[in-house]
């Protein structure tokens, strides 16, 4: 198995706990399309439970032979972003990204340089904000026989000071994984576990403790069940009694429907519950 990036050491458990729960927005529509000349378009629109709407339009062009990718995005906040990626151009296993952002209403700009270096037993990344600070965030993970260990740190060049640091250890196997992370200057600890029980059932859990806020430990457990080759259902609940369920199905080739709900089991008589629907069209 390849060594993941630092932020992905607990990816399997985090995806099970956080992805495909459609109650977070009251309505979501996503449209994806690809052209014969390797340009992919994606348009996303969301309506929040507070009746606010947001959207994002993305166009991505890829030249796989040269390892080059150009991505342009524009959102409803009128923010423009351009990203150029070059993979395996400078050296084997190295990917460089340059990201430029522009906000016309305030004429503010941003410029970032990201570097990724990946080998069979190592995955390192460096993120540089060239206009703010400048600042740098660097992380690295080493792995051997499924065992993983990583760390990250942020540095403000102008202040010549660390802005934060984190660490993580984990173990990954084909059907299960476990990880312990310490973030926010090693003050927030999380332990997560993921298990693919069989081809139909997945299960996972995550416990979180913030050493700055007290002795209470937050707990989440989740499970995914594949009903048939075209649909699946998910459910999760946390220590506060908030439960969420979701259902996803392929209505027809290129059309996905997602339904979800969140319910506070300790306040069933109050209007704290949320429901959402998602449509994804792909062609």
Image (cartoon, rainbow, N blue to C red):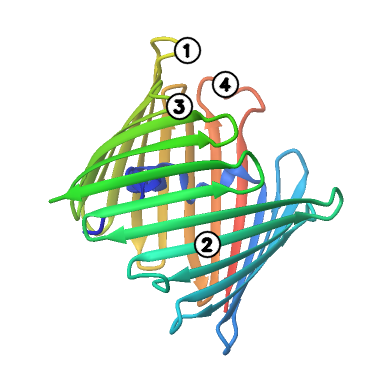
Q: Which residue is mark 1?
A: 213
Q: Which residue is mark 4?
A: 267
Sequence order check: which comes first, mark 4 or mark 3? 3
Label 1 to label 4, Cα distance in Å?
25 Å
Secondary element at image label 3: loop
Label 1 to label 2, Cα distance in Å?
37 Å
Q: Is residue 270 left or right of residue 108?
A: left
Q: Residues within 10 Å of mark 3 (few under 14, many from 20)?
A: few
Label 4 to label 2, Cα distance in Å?
47 Å
Secondary element at image label 4: loop
Percent coordinates x, y for residue 283 in the rendering = 57, 79
User: Is residue 4 visible in this depiction of the protein?
Assistant: no
Point out the frontmost of discs 1 and 3: 3
Percent coordinates x, y for residue 281 in the rendering = 60, 71
Task: State yes or no: discs 3 and 2 in contact (Cβ < 8 Å).
Answer: no
Q: Residue placed at 46% from the left, 82% from the top?
A: 66
Q: Which residue is mark 2?
A: 97
Quadrant of res 151: top left
Sequence order check: which comes first, mark 1 or mark 3? 3
């Amino acid at each position: 198995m390849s060594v993941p990036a630092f932020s992905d050491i607990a990816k399997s458990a985090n995806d099970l706990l956080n992805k495909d729960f459609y109650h977070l927005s009251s309505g979501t529509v996503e449209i994806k399309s690809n052209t014969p000349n390797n340009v992919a378009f994606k348009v996303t629109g969301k309506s929040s439970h507070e009746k606010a709407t947001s959207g994002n339009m993305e166009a991505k062009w890829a030249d796989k032979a040269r390892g080059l990718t150009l991505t342009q995005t524009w959102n409803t906040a009128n923010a423009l972003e351009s990203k150029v990626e070059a993979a395996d151009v400078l050296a084997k296993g190295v990917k460089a990204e340059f990201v430029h952002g522009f906000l016309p209403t305030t004429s503010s700009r941003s410029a970032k340089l990201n570097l990724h270096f990946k080998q069979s037993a190592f995955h390192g990344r460096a993120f540089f904000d060239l206009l703010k600070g400048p600042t740098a965030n660097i992380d690295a993970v080493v792995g051997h026989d499924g065992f993983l260990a990583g760390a990250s740190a942020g540095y403000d060049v102008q202040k010549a000071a660390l802005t934060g640091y984190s660490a993580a250890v984990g173990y990954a196997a084909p059907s299960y994984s476990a990880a312990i992370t310490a973030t926010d200057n090693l003050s927030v600890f999380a332990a997560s576990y993921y298990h693919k029980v069989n081809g139909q059932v997945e299960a996972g859990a995550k416990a979180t403790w913030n050493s700055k806020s007290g002795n209470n430990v937050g707990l989440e457990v989740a499970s995914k069940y594949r009903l048939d080759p075209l649909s699946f259902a998910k459910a999760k609940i946390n220590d506060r009694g908030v439960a969420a369920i979701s259902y996803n199905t392929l209505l027809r080739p290129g059309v996905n429907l997602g339904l979800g709900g969140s319910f506070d089991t300790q306040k069933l008589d109050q209007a704290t519950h949320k429901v959402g629907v998602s449509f994804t069209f792909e062609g």
